[in-house]
Amino acid sequence: AQSVAQPEDQVNVAEGNPLTVKCTYSVSGNPYLFWYVQYPNRGLQFLLKYITGDNLVKGSYGFEAEFNKSQTSFHLKKPSALVSDSALYFCAVRAPSGSARQLTFGSGTQLTVLP
Amino acid sequence: KAGVTQTPRYLIKTRGQQVTLSCSPISGHRSVSWYQQTPGQGLQFLFEYFSETQRNKGNFPGRFSGRQFSNSRSEMNVSTLELGDSALYLCGSSRDRDTYEQYFGPGTRLTVT
């Protein structure tokens, strides 16, 4: 079975500082990894994905994520946080093959960027 | 291009009633998945549809069902509603089963009283 852990329920960072939202995963085989963001009363918005290739993937709104196979991690990063980045962030994993194509999500991390 | 559309956006039902939620995927997308989001359980997979066939189902009771039409629009139905069914129901669409990312609608907020 696949699983995702987001160890921090809440992350606070000052505007302009770098931010990191942590994610670790467990899946059989090579993982497909994703980050989504959710603003209040909204659905999930796709940020970025890792399928294969470079360990550093770039996504929307200046976000990037680093895939680390040995540590089974996929941390979300941004060099300079904005107040508008404040939202709920979800890491997700999908099995690479087989019938189970669904996403398994982490519990979410509430990011607050302080002005 | 229009995004994923879900209707209605908000719904209030009474215990024991049934409800039907609708999802229209992005034009050209043929795979639709449904997820339930609650504060306690987080985001949980309900089912996946592709080519009008249910391809995968999550660990939910038989009261939860769904279907997909030939135009890829999907509906999910919950019968005999329970208080615990109160949740945000999200629909995600992707071009096909091998397309990696899913794009989500705004969700339907169901409240069961």
Image (cartoon, rainbow, N blue to C red):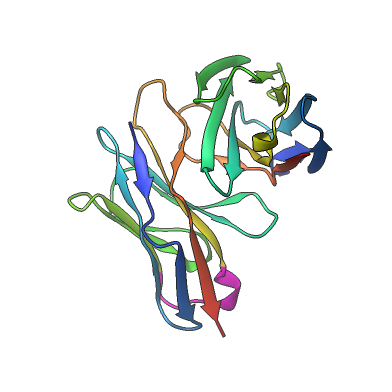
Q: Which quarter of the rendering shows the C terminus of chain B?
A: top right
Residue A98 position within the rendered picture, expressed as x and y whole percent measured from the top left: 36, 22
Front residue of B80/B29: it is B80
The residue nearer to you, when weighing B21 against B93, is: B21
Quadrant the N terminus of chain B occupies:
top right
- The image shows a total of numbered marks equal to 0
Apparent side of residue A48 relative to residue A7 in the rendered image (left or right): right
- Which picture quadrant has residue B29? top right
Residue at 55 percent across and 70 percent down: it is A85
| Residue A74 located left or right of residue A84 | left
Residue at x-position 43% and y-position 82%: A17
Where does residue B60 sit, x and y in percent of width and height?
Answer: 55, 25
Counting from the top left corner in percent of width and height, residue B98 is at 45, 29
| Outermost residue, top side | B53
Placement of B93 over or under A51, stated as above or below: above
Can residue B26 be seen at all in this image of the molecule?
no
**Which residue is depicted at the point 57% across and 49% down?**
B39
Is residue B66 part of the magenta span, yes or no? no
Task: Give the answer, above or below, for where A79 lies relative to A7.
Answer: below
- In the rendering, at what x and y percent does residue B43 appear? 53, 42
Residue B20 seen in the current view: yes
Identify which residue, A48 or A106, lies in the foreground.
A106
| First to last magenta residue range | A78-86
Instruction: Name the residue rendered at 59%, 45% in the picture.
Output: B38
